[in-house]
Each structure stands twice: as C-alpha cells, then as structure tokens.
Amino acid sequence: MYIAATLEANGFTADVLDASLDKLPDERILDEIRRVRPDAVGLSCTTHTRLEMRDLAAAIKREFPETFLFVGGPHVSFCPRETLERTAVDAVVIGEGEMKSLDVLSGKPMEEIPGLAWRCGDQIRINPDEGFIKDLDALPSPDRSKVQMDRYPGYSTLKRRTTHILSNRGCPFGCLYCSASFFWGKTTRSLSAAKVLGEIETLVRDHGIRALYFYDDAFTADRRKAEKICGELIERKLDLVWGTSTRIDLVNEQILRLMARAGCRQIDFGLETLNREVQSKVGTKATYERARDTIRVAVRAGIRHVKVYLIIGLPGDKPSSLRETFAKTLSMCATEVSTQVLRIYPGTPIEKLARERGIIPEGFSWYDDFRDGWSMFECVPQFTEWPRELLERQYDFLRRYLRVSGAARQRVPTVLLPAAAKLDSLFFRILTARMACFDDASLPAAVERDHEEAACAASCQ
C-alpha cells in the first residue's frame, strides 16, 4: 500500500491484490492479471512465501512473457542473485521499495538505481544500495483504499477489527536471529507524531477503525516519538485501543502508564531467554528482575494483555537452562507466554552460523522444495545444536502447556495474577522435574562438550 500510494502520487495507476486474504490459487491471481492487463507486476516475498512466489512468478511469465515482473521483501533482499537465478522474475528490489519501484517504472536506467538486482542479457547485476529513506514523512501514507478494509479480522486480544500501522523503521539491536536491523537499518527512523496521527484519523474517519497494532520492531525505541503519539491520542479522544511490541529494556513505569492512558491494551515483549550466556550471543539482555518488574508495572497500569515470547534452540542454551527460563518467565505476571523454535532466515547472523556448522548443508538453495520443517513454519529450516527429536519433544510439551496456561491466565482478575503466576511456575517445575527432554543428560556428549567450551570462552572474555 505504501508502494501503490507512492506510484499514484507520481502519475501511475496501481492496484493492490492481497492474495493471502482469501488464499487465492495461482489461477485466480492470473485471472486478475488478465482482467487488468498491467504493464508491470510486483510481488512481495517473505521466507514463508518464497516457494509460492517462485511458482507464481513462473506462471505469470509463461502467460505474460512481456510483463515486467519484479519482487521485493525481506527474503529476496538477502538473496537477490539466487532469486534471479532460480525464479522467473526480471528484477529484485533490495530493501525499502517505495522509491526504487518508482525509479524502475519511471524508466530510469537499471544500472543507475541503487539497491536493484536485475538481468542484463545473460548476466545478473546487483547495484549497491545507498542507504535508507531519511525523511519518512515525505512518503504518502499507505493507500488503504486499494483493499477492502472491512474484510480484515481483528486481534482477539483487542476485541475489535484491527489494522497495522508503522511509526518507525529500523532497529539498533541486531539480534542474532533477526534481519530487521539489516533490512530497515540500525538507526531508528521515525515518522513525525503529526504524520502518524493524520494516518490514524483517516483510519477512524474513512474506515471505521477502532483498534490498531503498531507494527514497529520496537515502538518505544524512539521514546520522544512514542510519548508524542500517546499524548496526542489522549488529547484527541479517538476511542481507540491498540497494541504494539517492544523490548523490556526500552520501557519504564512512566512510558507504560502513558501508553495505557492512551489506549494501549496489548504489549508484546521479545524476552527470548533468561540465560545470561545465551543473551550475550543473541543480542538480548533483560534480567529476570527487570523483566518481572516491567511486566508487573505494565499489568498494573492497565495494559490488559502482556505477552512474552521465548525461543527454543538458541545457540549455547541447554535443556536445564531452557527449563529455568520458562519456569522464571511463568512466575511473572504476563497474561500469555508464547514460544517458537529458532528459525533460520536469510540475512541473519544465525544463517551464517548455520552454514558454518553444516546445519544448512552445502548446496542448499532457498528455492529448492523444502518441507522438512515442522510446527508453524514447515518450509523454514530450524536451527538447533540438539538432536531434533529432543527439540520436538520440548516444543510439543511447551506448546500444549502454554496454551492451557495462557487461557487460564487471561481469565484471572488482575489482582490475583501474581499469585496465579507463582502457582503456574511451581506446577511447571514439578511437572518438568523428571522429564528427560529438560535434562542435560539427554544431550550427546559432543554437544555437552561444545557448550562447556563456549561457556569457558565467554567467561574468559
């Protein structure tokens, strides 16, 4: 929608087809292209949708060989050469797509467009990028008239029809498993509060929106911007509820109480692990005490749904320390704890580590058929230093336990949540005390030795 708005502001006609909303098969997408007969088709691609993008691109090129076909998104931005070698697309937009898409469709010479990978005869050329969009306010707001906004569902936790909104781009933290810092940049670039509030008022007035989710990597990374937005939401009395995600170390009592007054009813924290050695490797650093106190303040401030994310399979972790992380996290006042197995995405430091260790085998292509994953993302390889069977047992147990735990916590009155959390943690400890999948003895000797050497190296540093 950002790209469509940018193109239309510069004299182009652009349509948006959200094929994911109705899970449209390729033939239905081709029907829409037959109807519109566009000069160019742009596709979005994440790692989860890369194989669908590959197949759709081939189908489009078979029927419309003269149509210019380009692709962008976080997946292709980190493997542009491989994308051009293994799919039918004509060009790859690397990173932010608004101005590069405009340059491509305006006829600017390909070799002069920074951050573009393209075919030149039998060769593939990749132009170096020249940085990020500095003035985000200069971009038009996303053109939501291009889709049927009333067909998008709400967040169950916000209990109203919800849409996403961005107030900043960029993440300064560079966590091992995440590509955000490399895709959006390591400096937080914020839209002005006035720009964000203007977009929000349009959503309220034109689309009847009463719930938002700020889809920033960390809403409070720019504290001044966050405070201005909250202050304006309070002042304008728009009858909105909203949610967002951030880090434990980017909030304090003052900003949490301000967010709650401004209508924040959901906050998601990426805690990931409480193992100090693992934290030093992956880029997180919240202590148990800091996390516990922050979550307690958020709940008491009136933020009704406080969700904590943890990751299974982080480098250097052990079954026993993983169990301790979950037990300690369950003792906090969060209304939900969620987990997922560590996934490997292109452009992340974890991908490089996975290749070095042979977890991603030599010759692996992101565009080969891959369905060896499991749980939510079967087409994305998982990272693990442990035997897969051990990881599966841990995940299967934790997924079931956390589903029951979360359902119970969300029914507990806020005043009773601390006591309920302590009981939950105690029950978890008792239940897992003799489970082999949380016993370090279940690790092969070689893995245990690697962990001891890594711990020794970390202590020496």
Image (cartoon, helix red, strand yellow):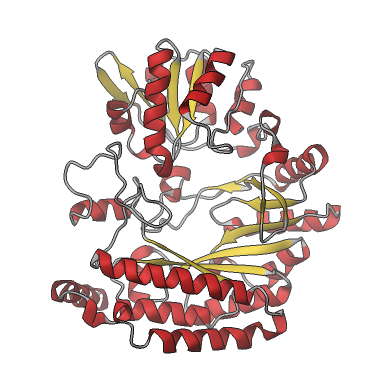
Residue at position x 14%, y 72% in the image = 446
Can you name the residue that lies furthest to the top here?
66
Q: Is residue 96 left or right of residue 435?
A: right
Residue at position x 76%, y 61% in the image = 263
Assign the C terminus to one quadrant of the image: bottom left
The picture places residue 438, in percent across and down from the top left corner, at 32, 79
Residue at position x 36%, y 60% in the image = 342
Against 303, residue 117 (above or below) is: above
- The quadrant holding residue 59 is top left
Does any portion of residue 360 appear in the rendered image? yes
Does any portion of residue 335 appear in the rendered image? no
Assign the N terminus to one quadrant of the image: top right
Asked whether 334 or 277 is in front, the reply is 334
- The quadrant holding residue 354 is bottom left
Against 55, residue 401 (above or below) is: below
Can you name the residue that lies furthest to the left here?
446
